[in-house]
Amino acid sequence: MRSVEAQLLHRPPGLTAGEIVRSLAAMQAQDVPAALLAFRARSTSLTPADVEAAWQSREIVRTWGPRGTLHFVHADDLPWIHALAGPATNTLRRLAEEGVTGDDPLPLITRALEGQGPLTKADLEERLGGRARGQGVVHLVALAAHHGLAVLGPSRAGKPTYVHAADWLGAPITPEPDRERALRELATRYRRAHHPADLAAWSGLPLGEARTAWGLSAAHPPPRPEEPLVRLAPAFDEYVMGWRSRDPVLAPEHARKVFPGGGILRPVVLVDGLIRGVWSRRGTQVTVQPFDDEVPPLEEEIADVHRFLRKFSRKA
């Protein structure tokens, strides 16, 4: 079973948003409200405004990370994470599928982003003059990100923004030149926070490179014994990501309730590290569906989610 303490779900006091992201190596952030709730699950004091401040100050950065999906990454960790990005083959294929043609996709998106600050997709469509629309714009930004030239800026009116890395961070992202060092750092961070999930599945690395990374890193002492713990973890929480088989934390007969298909991963009820139910929200209201009658009381967790979401709603 993955340790809830290694995942900071025991809520150690005083951690900043940046420290949480750095401890986890990267925090899944394809859905920003869910990512904010992942901070709540790991802190009794952080608010949505605290996370936003870390994002605005460039301490944490939203970009394509492990498995080629959007994550929050600590700014100090961008070089080694960027060094382990896979080839841009899939992005180029998706651009072709979206009808983005020509031999200049990288200069095209670089010119559109450079010197403009964060832009929404609609802003970029206008600046691209019809060369790309919809998801074609997003895949162009992903291509720029692959070359260290773009990241995502903070949301504007609930919509993602995209920004030239040099404008946002002061310089393009330069990958760590020593790939062995990057692999060692990856596996070391993984051992601390994510073991025993599958390193290849969590990172998106080919199996051979994942094995190399594993061999380069040292074993990490297991955390101290855990106290009983109940958490409402959001959709796509790091605790449930990267498993090749989730049987150690989720009874197979309940798997479809958590993963109904279509890439959906529902918010879960964690009891002592096991997934014992799912939950949902409408606005600030929380509805819990436990898998059995033996799930401990959840009133405190529900109240804390409600507290956090009210602050998020006021901010929005």
Image (cartoon, helix red, strand yellow):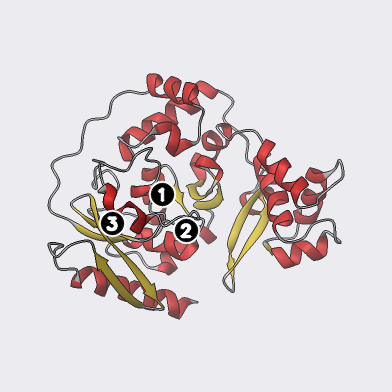
What secondary structure is marked by label 2? helix
State the residue position of label 3: 14
Residue under label 2: 54
Residue 208, how many percent across, how many down? 48, 21
Asked whether the beta carbons under mark 2 and mark 1 sit within 8 Å of each other, the answer is yes
Above or below: residue 215 compared with residue 90:
above
Which element type, helix, strand or loop, lies under badge 1? helix
Query: Which circle's residue, 3 or 2, is located before the other in the chain?
Result: 3
* Nearer to the camera, 309 or 99: 99
Few, some or many residues within 10 Å of mark 2 (<14, 14–19, 20+) = some
**The N terminus lies in quadrant:** top left
Which numbered dot is residue 21? 1
Residue 244 x, y percent position in the rendering:
38, 37
Question: Considering only vertical position in the picture, is 86 above or below 115?
Answer: above
Q: How far, Cα to Cα, is label 2 from label 1?
A: 10 Å
Classify mark 1: residues with Cα within 10 Å, few (<14), some (14-19) or many (20+): many
Residue at image location 66% in from the left, 58% down from the top: 162
Whether residue 52 can be seen here = no
Relative placement, left or right, of 106 versus 210 is right
Which of the two labelled residues, at mark 1 and mark 3, occupies the earlier sequence position? 3
Is 216 placed left or right of 205 in the picture? left
What's the residue at 18%, 51% (across, down)?
A: 272
Numbered disc total: 3
Residue at point 38%, 60% (across, down): 266
Question: Nearer the viewer's eye, disc 1 or disc 3?
Answer: 1
Q: Position of residue 315 (x, y in %)?
A: 47, 76
User: Mark 2 or 1 closer to N-term?
Assistant: 1
- The three-letter amino acid code for the residue at tag 2 is Ala
* Amino acid, disc 1: Val
